[in-house]
Amino acid sequence: MATRHQARTAVVGLLYAYDLGNENIAKFSDEILEEDKIRNKQRDFSHDLFDGTIENLEMLDAEIEKHLTDWDYDAIGRVEKAILRLGAYEILVAKTDRAIIINEAVELAKSLADEKSPQFINGVLDAIGK
């Protein structure tokens, strides 16, 4: 059975594809999640995260941008944006424990983004959560 971390990893991939302009990615999400062996409760969890993030995208982007220091929002990499959007959604909307979400986001950044991303993502999400 897939873990929540694996589910979040898949959601970052879906958000990344969405950000690239594939707005129909939701139609294929079940197939993508199945390919990653994300089933049952974790599939439902993944759908909730993806759908909730997309539904709140404008607010999440504004919140992320508000907490950037010395960064232009448009200069942030797409993977980093996906991780930040997911983390911001879980902190602000889903009301998941902030420390857990920041840790998850940092771990996602370590495995999916460049070496400076974990520290950047930690700082932004920490500011959002306060």
Image: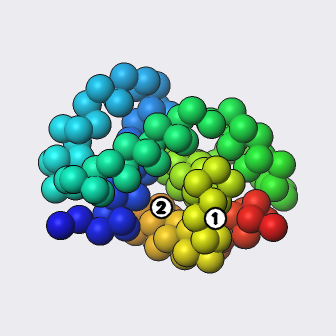
In the picture shown, does residue 22 fall above or below 99? above
For the C terminus, the quadrant is bottom right
Q: Position of residue 12 (x, y in %)?
A: 43, 50
Q: Nearer the viewer, residue 58 or 18?
A: 58
Residue 89: tell me if it is visible: yes
The kind of residue tagged 2 is: Ala
Q: Residue visible at 63% across and 64% down? A: 121
Viewer-side residue, 64 vs 94:
94
Q: Earlier in the sequence, mark 1 or mark 2?
A: 2
Residue at (77% x, 47% y) in the render: 63
Q: Are marks 1 and 2 in contact (CB under 8 Å)?
A: yes
- Looking at the rendered structure, the number of numbered marks drawn on it comes to 2
Residue at 43% x, 45% y: name it: 48
Q: Position of residue 1 (x, y in %)?
A: 18, 67
Please say whether residue 106 is visible from this viewpoint.
Answer: no
Give neighbour class at mark 2: few <14, some 14-19, many 20+ (Cα, 10 Å).
some
Identify residue for label 2. 113
Please indicate whether residue 92 sits to the left or right of residue 105 in the image: right
Rendered position, 48 above or below 120: above
Q: Position of residue 13 (x, y in %)?
A: 38, 47
Categorize mark 1 by other alpha carbons within 10 Å: few (<14), some (14-19), many (20+): many
Q: Is residue 107 left or right of residue 72?
A: left
Question: In the visual, does 18 lie left or right of 27?
Answer: right
Badge 1 marks a residue whose secondary structure is helix
Looking at the rendered image, the disc whose residue lies closer to the viewer, 1 or 2, is: 1
Q: CA distance from mark 1 to mark 2?
A: 10 Å
Point out which mark residue 121 bears. Answer: 1
Specify the amino acid type for callout 1.
Ile
